[in-house]
Amino acid sequence: MPITTYNSLVKKTFCDNAIRSVVMIDDDFITYSDSIRALSREIELDPNKIDSSKRAATLESFFQAKNMICDIDNGSVNFDVDRIRKSDLVIVDYHLDNNAPDKTITLLKELENSDHLNMIVIYTREDLPKAWMQIASSLKGVVNCNEIIIEKENEDLIDYWQNVILPDLKHQGERALRRDEVVSYIQDGRCCKRVKKIIREDEKITQQDDIDFIARMIAEYAISENAIIADENNKSIVSGDINGLKWIQSGNIFVCLFHKDVEDHENDGDRIWETLNESLIEWNPSYYQIIKSEIQNTIESEALSFNNHLANDDYGQAGWLNQILNSTSDEVKKKNINFVFSNLSEELYERLRGNKSLVGFINEVFESYSCDFKSSEEPKSLKYCSHKMNLPSNDNSYKEMYHALNMNLSSKNFEEGHISTGTIFFDTQFEKWYLCVSAACDLVPTQGNDPHHTRLSPHRLIKVLELFNASQSKALPFAEQSKYIYVIHKNSRKYLSIFEGEKTLPVVDYMVILNHGSVVQDEEKNIISAVFLSNMDGNIKNVPVRLKLKSQLRSGYAERYQAIASQYSSRIGVDYVSMVP
């Protein structure tokens, strides 16, 4: 059996299996109405439009031979971005309106934020290096360098920028970036060392932070000079080929540039398809992106059918409809709707898991990596995996990998509607970490008829374990002991434990969540208010603490910590007496 290669998997999932519809847009295409009028000798057709329409006909034949639905648009009558975004492949002329690229770049910026991955081929006679730079700069977004420098309120910086840097840049002097340096900055955001050296040698500014700042402003100035659309409100991450000629990836678009041959267009379909595939391989998507793409392909192919008992059981459907219609509050209605949605989502997962073609594809993805690793003759798998994900190959990077692995295994992002068993949260006032260990059934906002629930309503009492910082040297080698919790806080990886230092007993505490089930208005996401039980009086006059709900332990992990807290709380503390030295 032949081994499936990484390249063939990329081609398969992003092109062969993904592209089912193509739209071609060029203002030189002849519309159907103009064709009829020309046949009726009412008008004469422009020879340039005849040439472009011949190209369109050639491309249409190529894609129809691949069983793809083709649509041809002149970009002026039915130019609807929502309609265009539904096409898997968009082939668009660069100078779409009055020999200017503005309309095409506007289209790219709108598609960039779409939920649907669009592959786009820019079909143009423009010089490709120029077109690439204009598109990439426009997608990257610009800043107003002059305003930013003035906001610094540093007279030396302002004087240096206005009297030395700007005149030099306008005359393309030595401080101006070369094209390759602009391409590099667009893709990795690193300022040019050559320019930093010149700034340092000028001796107008001496602080390293100021030198770095001016170097960045010079790079941003170059982007603003190349951008066709100067959008200061939307900054994007842009990647592309190393030379800045062939492809661009940003947001949810993958743009491939293809030069129109003045004379020959008969083989443009094959050449476009080949260029697109080569560019996707150069992009080097991760195994995660490849698998996600194929899952989406499987869903969109309509190869899945729902046959769960809930889908077929009319009584079950009627029962849930009745529950939703008779919900006592919006919160209860939302909960009931989410339950139905959850059932459908679970069934979708089961259907995907049972799809032999998809499962086989995923196995092939990892088999291709396995074969590549063996053939690479790299003895360390950690180094190989770091390289494949474009990460540094060093000890710190490997430790971050294991932190991320354990965090993913044991927890997930907090997406619950309310705090529950296993919720990890951070007290932003006292900078302490806690883990909720109350029973999940006691934390459903719409439930709880016990007397203390009724008295506290709409607040809710919760039991927590305090979490303490743990050392990386313990939390990674002994991760399998399930004694540690892994979180990311302010872009820093943290290791937490229910035990402080060498202590072997956890710290149990109690809080009252204020307005349980509701977040604090006008705050960032997942912020709730609470007071400590020991500080509470009848009117809850104390200033509440702000709790940031960070993550949620997965089932099993949460119950383990709940059991530890219960065992500790139920201990008999008078059976033994410690010796006092």
Image (cartoon, rainbow, N blue to C red):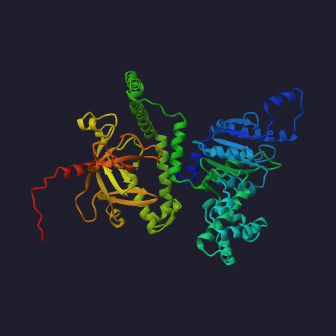
Viewer can see residue 463: no
Image coordinates of residue 40 in percent, x first then y, are 88, 26
Image coordinates of residue 72 in percent, x first then y, are 73, 36
Residue at the image point whose x is 22% and y is 61% from the top: 504
Residue at the image point whose x is 44% and y is 67% from the top: 396
Please name whichever residue, 154 or 78, is drawn nearer the observer in this view of the structure. Answer: 154
From the viewer's perspective, is residue 568 above or below residue 196?
above
The part of the image, by quadrant, that contains residue 487 is: bottom left
Residue at the image point whose x is 13% and y is 53% from the top: 572
Question: Along the horizontal axis of the image, is 25 left or right of 505?
Answer: right
Question: Along the horizontal axis of the image, is 178 left or right of 294?
Answer: right
The part of the image, by quadrant, that contains residue 64 is: top right
Please name whichever residue, 391 or 339, is drawn nearer the observer in this view of the structure. Answer: 339
Residue at the image point whose x is 66% and y is 49% from the top: 255
Please name whichever residue, 449 or 74, is drawn nearer the observer in this view of the structure. Answer: 449
The part of the image, by quadrant, that contains residue 266 is: top right
Q: How many labels does the image show?
A: 0
